[in-house]
Image (spheres, rainbow, N blue to C red):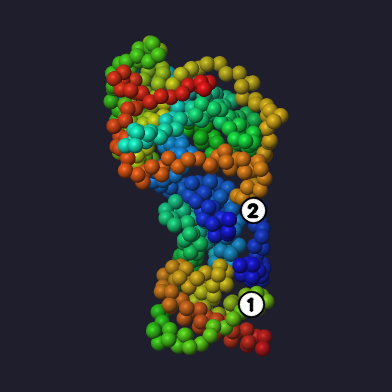
Amino acid sequence: MDSQRNFTEKLLRADGIDASALSGAELSRFRRLLNQTEQARPFWRKIMKTPIAKLTIAAAVIVAALLGIHFSGGTSTIAWAAVLEKVNGFDTCVFRTRQVETTGPRPDGFEFATEEESKVYRSDTYGSFSENYKNGKLHVRHYTLLQQGQHLSFFSGGPHKMCFRLPVKEEHIREFHNSDPRRMVAKILNGDYVQIGRDTIEGKRVRGVELRDPNVLSTDKQKAPAVDDFAARFWIDTETGLPVWMELSYVPQGSAVRTTMVWDQFQWGVPLEASLFAPEVPADYEVVDDDGSVPDSTPKTDAAEAFAQNTIAEPYLGDFDRLPLPDVSGLALLGIDPNVPKPQVRLLGET
Amino acid sequence: MDSENRLEGLVCRCQHGEQTAFEQLFRRFQPRLRYYVRRLDTMGDHADDTLQDIWVKVVREIGSLKDPKAFVAWLYAIARHEAYGRARIKDPFVELTDEHLERVTEHDEPVFTDEDATRIHQGLGKLKTHHREILTLSFLEDFSHQQIAEILGIRAGTVKSRIYYAKQSLRKELERNHG
């Protein structure tokens, strides 16, 4: 192998090509190309086949896709259109997100499920800050700081506490906008939704709309994913006209895993101070600055290994797709129907 | 973790859209692709544009690659398609008959070592395009006959005979220039 590599390198050198180093200009051109080129990725196939961490990422991608479709009128009545107008009038928002993935009750009596929960603070001026909990334990905090032009991630769930610090990139800005709950409202109202009546949530009288068409996920460049079941809903407080609960639930085609995401505990237009978006790195955190250069993929330090464990080592819930499992499409959504049992979701701070 | 497994992992990460993985892939293959494309680009002034088109296609289509192990052959197949398309070179290969194949098995292939690399590079430039291409693939990546067959869209047996004739031509060229 070494002989082959020597031979290749000599061959390239004879043509004036340095195999060990690319010019900065060449790499910059490639990075531009990468940012400008849209990938055709089979997202939903991956949902069924990849680890739970990837399930989470894929779910986030779906939500991002959902939120990323441009609002362009649609079929909303004047009342529902006013909801969008109202939320667009706020430049801050605080809310909780929860995600439950479950196989449903299996023939052997077990049910495999994972939960993730986040508290999110958003400001059009300062950026976003989120605390992410996995199975009730604080796992990571993310900051996208628009004014400082920095993106920070504090990993605290693994054996090593680490802070990754890098310049805000286009992808962070895109993620910031795509995770905006105002876009979720816009997407649902832009689809062929139906009104699902009135109910009560946390003592508030609410009314809701529902969208069952997964094609809302599709864009000009991306085909709608195949699903066995899909529903996107939100409910507004009938007094304030503001959303108090949003949910998205789906079963990828042929999968034995249902994913349900809920957004609630909204505080629209709440004052958020600048200090909330000026994090200090605790002394016991190792800081890793990423200047955009390309790291070697092989972990070489304990810290890198810890990062790999924090981000990659996950159980394979998707493996259950290969087993003869019950149909989960009939499982209850995290809806507000009092006759439908709701999956247990751990709240922030609960142990 | 050996090199092959690392490459598979890198390709998988690219399929998940990881930007740093794409950059590592680019660093690893760009020099060799440049060499390969330059060998096909007889006019010599399209290499940069061709390389850009190749990487656009890789970024766009890597999600559709079912087997990460097939990445290298897939990459060179794209490179070949783009290089030929841009330079409007007609595929220079002509199917050989079985008679040619039988004759090949009667002879040993010429052997080249890394000491010959500079002379080989000069010699390649003197060969016909179809000989130059198959030897470049063979020398650059240590491809198996089956992999080269996949890139060129021909049978593995045919690859063997073509490499044989290409090496014969190269040896004659080297002998002519260096005695």
Q: Residue at x 46, y 36 (%)?
A: A56
* Label 1 crowd bin: few (<14), some (14–19), many (20+), radius 10 Å: few
Residue position for label 2? A25
Q: Could you tell me the amino acid type at mark 2? A: Ala
The location of residue A246, given as percent across then percent down, is: 39, 24
Q: Can residue A122 be seen in this snapshot?
A: no
Residue found farthest to the front: A108
- How far apart are the two marked residues, 2 and 1, measured between alpha carbons? 34 Å
Q: Which residue is label 1 attached to?
A: B113
Which is nearer the eye, A37 or A101? A101
Co-location on one chain, circles 2 and 1: no
Q: Is residue A108 above or below residue A25?
A: above
Across and down, in percent, residue A52 comes to 46, 39
Q: Is residue A7 left or right of residue A350?
A: right
Residue lying at 55% horizontally and 70% vertically, measured from the top left: B142
Which numbered dot is residue B31?
none
For disc 1, the chain is B
- Mark 2 and 1 residues: CB-CB less than 8 Å, in contact? no
Q: Chain of mark 2?
A: A
Query: How many residues crowd around disc 2 within 10 Å: few (fewer than 14), some, or many (20 or more)?
Result: few
Q: Amino acid at mark 1?
A: Thr
Percent from the top left, x then y, of residue A222?
A: 39, 44
Position of residue A234 measured from the top left corner of the image (x, y, whole percent):
37, 23
The residue drawn where x is 46% and y is 53% is: B62
Which residue lies at the image location 62% right of the left edge and 84% below the top edge?
B174
**Can I make out residue A164 in this image?**
yes
Q: Secondary structure at mark 1?
A: loop
In the picture, residue A107 is in which quadrant? top left
Q: Is residue B132 above or below residue A90?
A: below
B179 or A286: which is nearer to us? A286
Identify which residue, A286 or A104, lies in the foreground.
A104
